[in-house]
Image (cartoon, rainbow, N blue to C red):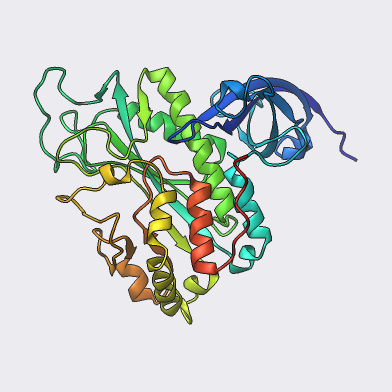
Amino acid sequence: MKAEVTTMRQAEYIWLDGETPAQQVRSKARIVTIDDDVSFHPHGFPQWDYDGSSTYQASGHDSDLILQPVRVVRDPLRCHGARLVLCEVLRPEGAPHETNTRARLRSQLANGAAAHEPWVGFEQDYTLFEGERPLGFPTDSAAPKSQGPFYCGVGADRIFGRDFVEAHTQACIDAGLMIYGINAEVMPGQWEFQIGYRGIDSEAPDVLKVSDHLVLARWLLRRVGERFGVEPRLDPRPVTGDWNGAGNQTNFSTANMRDKATGLNAIRDAVKRLATRHDEHIAGYGYGLAEGTNSAHEPWSITEFKSGVADRGASIRIPRAVELAGGGYLEDRRPGANCDPYTVCTLLIETICGTSVARPSLN
């Protein structure tokens, strides 16, 4: 019988705070002794309290909140057996805090949504800043070259921050996150990474796991940024001017949408359902969406719902390859770069699958 080995290791507890208009990642490290055979299991890590009054989640008169471990991955920055421990925020009595949007998605899946086998993938845009200037922008008042040469570009005159991007990508791989691509975006210093389906049979890109991985990847963005002296920002409109905004296009599917026998009909039905709740989705897809849309480049309207095959100016795009294959997924192009992935998935499931749970009280 194999003996259990208990190891002392560092565990970085990570959670979403209550900052507005967009929640931010927070973290603190704990030294724990964990048996090796449970070092990737959340139940192997203890709960931990913290001061919610310093994270916009409680008053100073009643500030104690609880971090409940829910997902554990390798810590690619510390190594040596260290772990990143993603947590939900609970009240002392054990109820989810009102800022805990993950709990609502989890409840929705338990309420019947899991039967639809929802999958998701995120295309996360971000912009690297050095002080108040995007990386690659001139230090004087001159404007950079106009949009065109930077997207997927190569060369020191077009690409800025690649060393940071490579370090972040490798950190995501080493952590075991479901990252599947990176590319330079349309503006100097602007990049994108994708989290979700990679075509690996042993990986199911379910909405809870992929949303967790996106939050962990965002945390790694900030931490790797510390090393390089740059600030990755998720603003939908990072600078004024004639540029695309920064989004988080969301690829969503159910089992029926992926089945070629039912795929296109299921996708068309999903689009019809999404059209009926456009305003509600916009309200939950991040702040600053009005500033993030642009009439000159891939325009879409926050007030008017539109769908189309291969149409990047639509609210919902059906990829041409999906149409030709007879099934697959749809791309929701509306979420902003700063969106909450749990809220995005909750809204998509509510609308497309018809399942919902009570919203948490704000009292």
Q: Position of residue 298 (x, y in %)?
A: 21, 54
Q: From this view, report whether residue 1 is shown above or below residue 203.
A: above
Q: Residue furthest right?
A: 1
Judged left or right of residue 291, residue 96 is right
Q: Is residue 169 visible?
A: yes
Residue 236: x %, y % from top left: 31, 40
Which residue is at the front of the view, 203 or 50? 50
Q: Quadrant of residue 9?
A: top right
Left or right of residue 66: residue 341: left
Residue drawn 43% across the image and 18% down it? 227
What percent of the width, then of the height, locates residue 291? 26, 42
Residue 290 % position (x, y): 28, 46
Q: Is residue 279 left or right of residue 120?
A: left
- Which of 287/139 is in front? 287
Q: Residue at x 10, y 20 (%)?
A: 141
Toward which corner of the image does residue 61 lie, by quadrant? top right
- Seen from the viewer's position, the closer of residues 52 and 47 is 52
Q: Furthest-bottom residue in view?
A: 261
Query: How many marks are shown on the rendered structure?
Result: 0
The single residue placed furthest to the front in the displayed view is 363
Of the 4 image quadrants, the one containing the C terminus is top right
- Check the picture and name the quadrant holding the N terminus: top right
Residue drawn at x 10%, y 28% is 143
Residue 3, image quadrant: top right
Q: Is residue 92 above or below residue 259?
A: above
Q: Is residue 197 visible?
A: no
| Vertical placement of residue 3 versus 103, above or below | above
